[in-house]
Amino acid sequence: MPFSSESGATRWDQATALAMLIGGISSFQIGAALAKGLFPLFGPTGMVGLRVGLAAIILLVVWRPKIMDLRPGTWRLLLPYGASMTLMNFAFYIALTRLPLGLVVALEFMGPLSLALVGSRRALDLFWAVLVITGVFLLLRPEGKLGHLDPLGVAAALSSGVGWIVYILTGTRLGRSMPATMATTLGMTTAGVFLLPCLIPALPLAVYHPHQGFLALGVAVLSSAVPYILDMMAMRRLKPRELGVLLSLEPMLGAVSGLLFLGEALSLGRWIGVICVVAASAGNVLTSRRPPAETQVTPPG
């Protein structure tokens, strides 16, 4: 694993990264709840095209990246980074039409959770990972017959988790070779190109329905532009394993967003699962150790 000796983050770096991730996840969940209300007009594919495409345009206008300054090897990371954004967003919205927001986010989280398990080295790291598994299990635990879970929705949510793995691995490395804003802008633009078949049919609907079009623009800002920049800034401070465990806050905030914005009430068992996830995330940050100086590698650029 090429990241094992990189990014010896201090506790301050980790705390800052945690704050960034909480802000990004919260913004994403609010945008996701807003997007679900726009599905009747745009559909999930049209909504994901608008969200990513509009976010790419916003980022290009604001940051104006200099593509000519890219190193030749950067494209080998940028293309899979953009492709992972495409898979994450597309599969997430497909799953959102078939499952509650909190459940989709919990299933999607299996991606970064796998990084936490693979990268564990200490017994304490395994304890936090087990605590995360317990929390996710309680969030996913069926409270009735298992048949109510839509198979396509579950498959789509898990596919989004696979995209999340690639996103973390490529984004962590890419974020150390260029500014976070530039990496996010180029990655979002790459994803926007991949999603052009979804964007083009949705644009006339956005024009003919300006109110919904304005809300779609808000989704682009809340669910793409803001969280991905914050993610990238956090990636510059953390290893993939650390990032994977910290992102365990995603199921918690997804469940809370579902409750606040979509009326998806949580049972007592799922609230306990939320507490387990929060405890594991905070514990990982407070107990992680900085690698010795001689094992650190200075990030390129």
Image (spheres, rainbow, N blue to C red):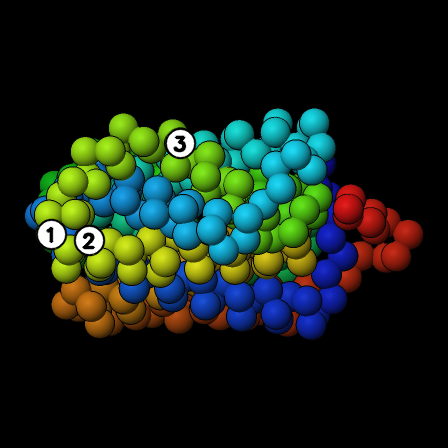
Is residue 244 visible in the rendered image? The answer is yes
Question: Residue at point 29% right, 69% down?
Answer: 256
- Under tag 3, what secondary structure? helix
Q: Which mark is residue 209?
A: 1
Between the residue at mark 2 and the residue at mark 3, the CA separation in whole angstroms equals 20 Å
Q: Is residue 72 above or below residue 166?
A: above
Please indicate whether residue 115 sits to the left or right of residue 162 in the image.
right
Q: Amino acid under label 3?
A: Val
Sequence-wise, the earlier of marks 2 and 3 is 3
Residue 281 is situated, as x and y percent measured from the top left of the image, at 52, 65
Q: CA distance from mark 1 to mark 2?
A: 6 Å
For residue 193, which numbered disc appears in the image?
3
Residue occupying image coordinates x 14% and y 68%: 263
Residue 95 appears in the rendering: no
Q: Which mark is residue 288?
A: none
Amino acid type assigned to the residue bearing label 1 in the image? His
**Dot 2 lies on which element?**
helix
Residue at screen point 41% across, 52% down: 58
Q: Is residue 155 above or below residue 253?
A: above
Q: Which residue is mark 2?
A: 213
User: Mark 1–mark 2 contact, CB under 8 Å?
Assistant: yes
- Give the CA separation, mark 1 to mark 3: 24 Å
Residue 223 point in image, percent of width and height: 35, 55
Q: Residue at x 52, y 36 (%)?
A: 81
Asked if marks 1 and 3 touch (Cβ < 8 Å), the reply is no
Q: Residues within 10 Å of mark 1 (few under 14, many from 20)?
A: few
